[in-house]
Amino acid sequence: EAEIRACRKELGVTPCVKQIDTLAAEFPAQTNYLYMTYSGDSNDVESPMAIDLPQDLSRSTSAINFEKRVRAVSDVHSGKRLLDFKERGVMVLGCGAYCIGSSVEFDWCAVSAVRQLRRDNIRSIIVNYNPETVSTDYDESDRLYFEELSLERTLDIYEHEGVSGIIVSVGGQIPNNLAGPLVENGARILGTSARDIERAEDRNQFSDMLDTMGIEQPAWSVLTSVEEAATFANKVGFPVLVRPSFVLSGAAMRVASDNTELKNFLALAEDVAADKPIVVTKFILGAKEIEFDAVANKGVILNYAIGEHLENAGVHSGDATVVLPAQKLYGNTIRHVKRYASAIARSLEITGPFNIQFMAKGNEVQVIECNLRASRTFPFVSKTLKNNFISLATRAMCGLSPTPYRISLLDIDYVCVKAPMFSFTRLRGADPTLGVEMASTGEVACFGADAHEAFLQALLATNFKLPPKNGSILVSIASTSFLYEFADAACLLKKMGYNLYGTPGTSKYYNDKFNLDMKSILKPEHEEDMTTDGIVQSSLNEIRAGKIDLLINVSDGTSVKGSVTGGYIMRRAAVDFGVSLITNVKCAVFFAEALFRGHDTFSSKTIKEFYQIPTIGWQAD
């Protein structure tokens, strides 16, 4: 690609910069809606900082790249003055099209970066092609390019504008994957180096690094053949997690419970990962997942936030319910998280935003992965702590000696909970359950005096309908361990006066052990199963008739994705007929506790009211 590009430029085949006429030719347009095209022979806007990268292929690649990195070399030869960093500006790559895994959270990060650049009087150029984003508002940046986030187009804009560097870490996975190719073509990346980004994204290299540093991680192996993967899985024991590299939202990530599933999932991962490594790791059941979002400068962490997933590990972070600050972590667990994160930041020489996902079981902490870019939780963290982490990261990446915010997580006198939003009603046939591959299309966050209040408000913000007093709740739980875990919550629901229904196995368990008088209804065997035995009703019929106000359906997680089970039929019917649905046992228990505490009668407050709550030893500026 580099040789073809050099040949094209040598032949004079270069695109022109054109301005979109937003005034229908009635008046001269001043808005900076720009794009590049080969259908033209002149630029509508010129850049005094345009550079001419050398294209002499007879010289070594290292010599060419050295001259490319020294951005002012052509200006020096022509006797022009050197343009300083701020005048030449910074190019920010946006998030691209909205999709599962890449949405408005990353656009917030890009906009925050551009606004900080302008506050610091640094010329800003943004590249994005999604008109739904705020970053593509004409007045957000000095130059706005409606262009694809491809290597060739990014280089064309980079050369035309002559910027000091490119920020790739605020737009999600698409621009982050361009870091390596951009550097290979002579572009300057601001923040963490492309080499260190690759060390974090490449599952094989990252796992090797953790082993060298003595940092705990689940047992892992790089895929070289299906036979070797099967041997590893049988050695460590099923279930195992199949994880491609350089992907967003857990694409093609699967939990395999046997050799047949492992073989199928490896084939799927190979299609998604292309030539990137695929790692198979031991999947730890019953572990808690921890989010660590931070900003570092030259390997030293400036600020951080530790949030915990309400669900156990196995639910993608984009689909998980996140509690911030963490409420139920051991002190020793927090110390391990901070120690591991500091060591990883030093090893990768991180400058800018990053996210590490940890897994804890008891006091044992293990690292799942590290993303050297802004995560989708950065807006959530920034708003909760009333300090913009992306603004701090932008100053760090631009070398402006950032000052850390004064934040003490232990002194914050409120809790914020982030809950996912799904579009299952628009995805016909999709299974509305949670897993390691992301499915949510949005998220909400709410503040509360405690985690239960914030959780219930966040649920309501997702259009979740609370069951009315004396309403009907259908419970269907697959495994004995989950039945036991939900037992106290079931007793609370019964004490509050709800009418409890259960599928045969579930109702028998709670009636025999806790005397809950849970009415038994049949589990459907197929999607049109409306049969009854004259006494026991069909759960599918009850849901479709509007007689069920809430379905709590917790599967054992071992069924093959896409298979039609009784649980799937009930979940799908709940979505199609507007019945509230909870599919995770941790969320179900937390929900029952929140109702029992009376948080369904809360009085809402504005975010400013929470920011004004007096605290000890900490106050947001």
Image (tube, rainbow, N blue to C red):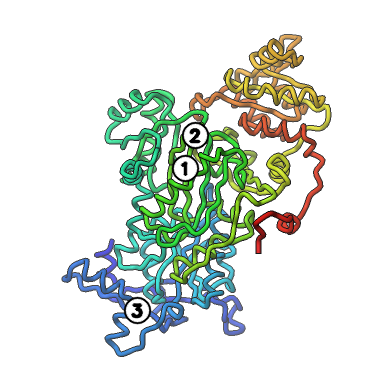
In the rendered image, is residue 274 in sight? no
**Dot 2: element:** loop
Q: In whole angstroms, how far apart are the C-alphas of marks 2 and 3?
A: 55 Å
Query: Which residue is labeled 2 in the image?
Result: 363
Q: Which one is nearer the viewer's eye here, 617 or 151?
A: 617
- Three-letter code for the amino acid on which mark 1 is drawn: His
Q: Is residue 536 left or right of residue 32?
A: right
Q: Which one is nearer the viewer's eye here, 619 or 514?
A: 619
Q: Position of residue 144 (x, y in %)?
A: 51, 71
Q: In whole angstroms, how far apart are the C-alphas of marks 3 and 1?
A: 48 Å
In the rendered image, is residue 398 in sight? yes
What is the number of the mark on residue 336?
1
Q: Quadrant of residue 282?
A: top left
In primary-sequence order, the first of circles 3 and 1 is 3
Is the C-beta separation of discs 2 and 1 under 8 Å? yes
Query: Which residue is labeled 3 in the image?
Result: 51
**Crowd band around label 1 with a 10 angstrom C-alpha radius: few (<14), some (14–19), many (20+):** some
In primary-sequence order, the first of circles 2 and 1 is 1
- Three-letter code for the amino acid on which mark 2 is drawn: Asn
Residue, far bottom: 79
Q: Position of residue 308 (x, y in %)?
A: 57, 42
